[in-house]
Amino acid sequence: MRKNLIFAEGEVRFLREMTRSKVDFMIVGLSAAALQGAPVVTQDVDLWFRNLSDPSITKALRKVGGAYVPPEGDHPPVFSGEAVQLFDIVTHMHGLKSFEEERRGAVKIPLGGFTVAVLPLDRIMKSKRSLGRPKDKLALKVLSDALRAARGRSARKG
């Protein structure tokens, strides 16, 4: 039985290929929160990359039948293909430090025989507070409760 049921097999395969190809990325947003136990629902999986021009991203995409579509005009960069249709590319995280600084504090989450880097709950909350959108404000209470619960579990283990 698979542990993290928020991803379908094709999505896990893409994440595995990126990990094998040593692409430096993090899962951010509500998907990252869900992987850390927050009871949230989201329609996409936000990925933040150190370097979008890394050829290893294209290599991983090809292995799962996906492609990278670069930004054009007002349109942001996107992935296309069935296995990657739920993934969104994040180019900036509001209210946070640089990718490199945030990546140092990433949480490692096991996923099907490999691990993925995930933005910690407190940093997700900081970004959502910074954005201040109504949907982000609604998520903050749930994220705060999940963070408190995670800290309580950690304190009991220690």
Image (tube, helix red, strand yellow):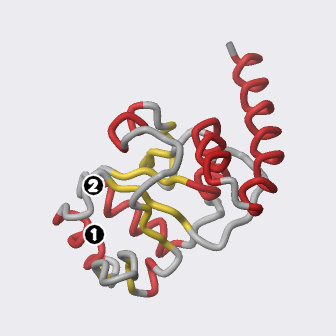
Residue 66 lies, in percent from the top left, at 33, 82
Quadrant housing the C terminus:
top right
Q: Determine the residue positioned at 69% across, 53% down.
A: 132
SS state under label 1: helix
Distance of label 1 from label 2 (alpha carbons): 9 Å
Q: How many numbered dots are placed on residues in this image? A: 2
Which quadrant of the figure contains the N terminus? Answer: bottom right
Q: Is residue 71 left or right of residue 3?
A: left
How dense is the environment of label 2, judged by Cα within 10 Å: few (below 14), some, or many (20 and up)? many
The quadrant where residue 120 appears: top right
Image-quadrant location for residue 117: top left
Q: Amino acid at mark 2?
A: Val
Residue 60, label in figure:
1
Query: Which three-letter amino acid code belongs to the residue tagged 1?
Result: Ala
Residue lying farthest left?
Answer: 55
Q: Position of residue 9 (x, y in %)?
A: 52, 72
Q: Is residue 85 above or below residue 21?
A: below
What residue is rendered at 27% in x and 55% in y?
23
Q: 3 or 64, which is in the foreground?
A: 64
Indicate the position of residue 50 as horizontal and vertical percent values: 29, 51
For mark 2, what is the residue? 23
